[in-house]
Image: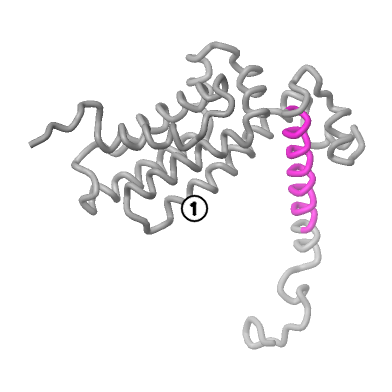
Amino acid sequence: MTGYNDRPVSRLTDWFPPALMSETKEAVVEEYRRSTIQAAARRVIARRGLGGTSMAAIADEAGVAKGTLYLYFRDRDDLLEHAAGRIFDELLGHLAGVLAGSRPFPESLRELVLTNIRFFDENQGFLRTYMAFKHGDDVAAARHHRRRRPQYARYLQMLTDYLAAAVRRGDLKTVDPARVALFLAEGTGGILRQRLDEPGRPPEEDVEWIVDLLLNGLCPRRRS
């Protein structure tokens, strides 16, 4: 194997100094530990609710010493906030995969909404606790907090780009893609919160009427 300037390379250290390799390995280990702890926190909170969740319980679930948690998080509430951030990152990853596809617009829109709802349903135990802890019934506070999240800004930009491309292709009439993106995000978010009080409601029911509303509007079609 040859490397930079055709110098033979037989070891990874020929490319990366040992100090850099050590820093990289430590960063990977730290990220793995953070991820493991956050995943454990999500499971414990989903099962027990916030009142039954302690740092000791999370440490037991993660298989680490309780003191290890405090190397990465100030306290339980800080851990909760970071766990929520990670879950929203995961959702963005799923949605980005949908938007990267090449299916016709109605199909991709349906898949986008379905992915959002299914992800929320699968993580409902944790998200219900998180929203109650952060905001209770204060919808305005919840909206303000959501809009401050960097993930929400990225989500809106993803939707805006997706809708703008649909307009350019002629799949949508000329609209302001940023405002439609906001309408879609906030409207879907409202349905997701409503679903907390409707256990067992099939996601497809909400998907179909959200998509129908966006594509066909509220007025019935007049027969010619």
x and y percentages locating residue 165 in the rendered image: 29, 50
How many numbered badges does the structure rendering display? 1
Q: Is residue 46 left or right of residue 211?
A: right
Q: Label 1 crowding class (10 Å Cα cut-off): few <14, some 14-19, many 20+?
A: few
- Left or right of 165? Residue 23 is right
Q: Amino acid at mark 1?
A: Gly
Where's residue 65, x and y in %?
92, 37
Residue occupying image coordinates x 39% and y 36%? 208
Residue 32 in the magenta stretch? The answer is yes
35 or 22, nearer to the observer: 35
Magenta range is 25-45
For residue 23, side relative to residue 134 (left or right): right
Measured as percent of width and height from the top left, residue 7 is found at: 69, 86
Q: Residue furthest top?
A: 137
Q: Residue at x 84, y 27 (%)?
A: 55
Query: Picture quarter containing residue 172?
Result: top left
Taking depth in this image into account, of 88 and 199 the one nearest to the observer is 199
The picture places residue 81, in percent across and down from the top left corner, at: 67, 28
User: What's the residue at 59%, 44% (across, down)?
Assistant: 90
* Residue nearest the viewer, comparing 222 with 18: 222
Q: Residue at left 80%, top 66%?
A: 18
Residue at label 1? 97
Quarter of the figure that contains the C terminus: top left
Mark 1 lies on a secondary structure that is: helix
